[in-house]
Amino acid sequence: MFNLGSLLHIQTGLFAKGYGEGDVHYLQVRHFNEQGKRIEALYGDLLSNELSQKHLLQEGDVLFAAKGMKNYAVAVDKDWLPAVASTSFFVLRVTNKKLSPNYLMWYLNSPTIQGNLKNKAIGTAMPSISKQALESIEIPIPSLKTQEVIVKLSALRQKELEIKQNIELLRTEIIHHTILKSLHKSHE
């Protein structure tokens, strides 16, 4: 087991006011759902010539939502770049080549770690996870191949759950449509 602090560099996101136009995306919590999936379109909000290079995200970075009730992790997608993260996030940059960013994301989103993080949260109205609490998390590091298998297996399970949910929604629509159709026939 390794402490996260020994495997990666953690920095806070950037506080900025978006201009509504620019060439850099300003990633905020509102861009993601509670599972860390991007739900809102990204637009250039900031100007790159007004930003420090240290705040620009890189492919392989992991964003960790440190403030609020849901503390998810999400891997930065190359399609989002150029981008910076808001202060609601910690930017986790892996420095140890034995740790995959996607495995790190999976591990931080696992129910056990989420529970541990909730216990370390500070504050009640807007709980937050400190940098020190994040650095102290212990993580097992299997081989990169095993990490890849874990991430793929988790993604397949998530896809399965989404398909099941869609099937249930479709069944509900079919039943609702059938009932409405029979009601309209009974009034004719």
Image (tube, rainbow, N blue to C red):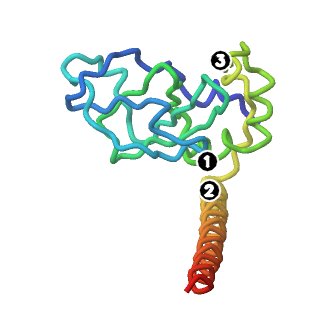
Counting from the top left corner in percent of width and height, residue 130 is at 65, 16
Q: Residues within 10 Å of mark 2 (few under 14, many from 20)?
A: some
**Residue at (67, 42) in percent of width and height:** 109
Q: Is residue 43 left or right of residue 91?
A: left
| Numbered disc 3: secondary structure | loop
Give the amino acid type for the residue marked by disc 3 in the picture. Answer: Met
Label drawn at residue 103: 1
Split into 4 quadrants, where in the image is the N terminus? top right
* Label 2 close to label 1 by CB (< 8 Å): yes
Q: Which residue is mark 2?
A: 151
Q: Nearer the viewer, residue 174 or 79?
A: 174
The answer to which quarter of the image holds residue 173 is bottom right
**CA–CA distance in space, label 1 to label 3:** 28 Å
**Residue at (67, 20) in percent of width and height:** 129
Q: Which residue is mark 3?
A: 126
Counting from the top left corner in percent of width and height, residue 156 is at 62, 65
Give the amino acid type for the residue marked by disc 2 in the picture. Answer: Val
Q: Is residue 95 above or below residue 102?
A: above
The answer to which quarter of the image holds residue 57 is top left
| Numbered disc 2: secondary structure | helix
**Residue at (71, 20) in percent of width and height:** 133
